[in-house]
Each structure stands twice: as C-alpha cells, then as structure tokens.
Image: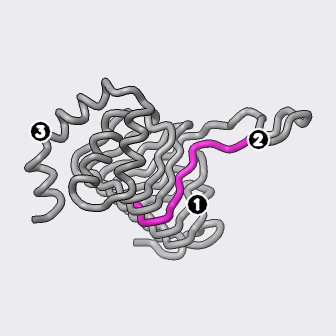
Amino acid sequence: MKGSKLFNLFNPLINFTSRVFKFFPRFIRTWLYDLSSIFSGFLAITLRYALIKSAAKKVGKNVYIGRGVVIKNSQNLSVGHNVSIHDSCYLDSIGEIKIGDNVSIAHHSSILSFNHSWTDTDKPIKYNELALSPVVIKDDVWVGCGVRIMPGVTVHSRSIIAAGSVVTRDVPAEVVVAGVPAKIIKRL
C-alpha cells in the first residue's frame, strides 16, 4: 500500500493524536520527536508528522518527514499537502518558512530564515541581533540533495534546484538552477 493511501486510511487517528499532542509541554513533544527520528517505518513517520502538525503554523495532508530531520522554531513553519522532507534535512523557521504543495526536499538540505547581523561591533557576531527573512517555496518544486536555501529566498512553482546548490536569490518559475551561487541553467 502506498504511503498516501495509508495516510488517508489513518488520517482521523493522526489528526486526533496531533490535537492531543498540542496539550503536551514543548519539551515532551521535542523529546518524542527526537526519539522518533531514530526510527524509520510507518509508526515513526506518523509520530513525526503528528508532532510537527501539533507545533507548526500549518501542515497539510500526506507529509513525509524522514529520519534525522531537524526543525527549529516550528511555530513559524507552514507546509502544504504532499510534501516530502527527506532524511537529515535542517529547517530553521525563526524568520518563517512556507512550503507549498507537491514539494520534495532531498536529504541533507538546509533552509534558513535568518542571518547573523553585525550591527554592534563591540559584541561578538554570534551575540548580535538576528536578521529575520522568510523563505517561500511555492508548489511543485524539487530541491535536490545537499541544497542550501538562504534567508529571504522565494522559489517559484515548477522549479528544480540541482544537488549541492546554494540558493541566495529568488528562483523564477519553471527553471532548473544549479551551482554556488545557484544560477539558471535551463528553462522548463
């Protein structure tokens, strides 16, 4: 049975579990999420989904979160339907991350919604204010493995980001981008 069929079959139970998790203290949810990240299989995937759904701004149906995925500041995260975030990805949504429908994010990719500023030169850089800047990934986007999407970037619909790319600027619709920094290499 495909994952989406299993998801639809158990959706009422998953939604109930997610609502129950909202009453758990944050540290308990974090502990359960970290514990589930060790395991693969339907139960662990379902647990990760229910926990993120209980903490995030919005999470759609049929969302796969792989093993070892780190999601920080999930209260500023919105995820659409039919999204897969594969193993060992890192998302920090302190400045907000919005992911549309039908998006695939391959393993070992990172999405950052903040930068360190250096406005007070008397302080070490790591203690200066953060510069928050949202990241938007629109519908039908494929993010290859090992990609870095930097703060303030919008990736428009039906685009592909090649493996190993560092995305520092907006990506137009219907293109393939690659490189460091990512540049358009093909129009779809």
Q: Is residue 177 or residue 114 the one in the foreground?
A: 114
Could you tell which of marks 3 and 2 lies nearer the N-terminus? 3
Q: Identify residue type, mark 1.
A: Val
Q: The residue tagged with tag 2: helix, strand or loop?
A: helix
Could you tell which of marks 2 and 1 lies nearer the N-terminus? 2
Q: Is residue 133 or residue 49 the one in the foreground?
A: 49
Q: The residue tagged with tag 1: helix, strand or loop?
A: strand
> Which residue matches tag 3?
12
x 11%, y 47%: residue: 10
State which region is magenta.
Answer: 105-117
- Tag 2: Cα neighbours inside 10 Å, few (<14), some, or many (≥20)? few
The quarter holding residue 42 reads: bottom left
Could you tell which of marks 3 and 1 lies nearer the N-terminus? 3
> Which residue matches tag 1?
167
Residue reaching furthest right? 122
Residue 61, percent across and down?
A: 22, 46
Q: Quadrant of the N terminus?
A: bottom left
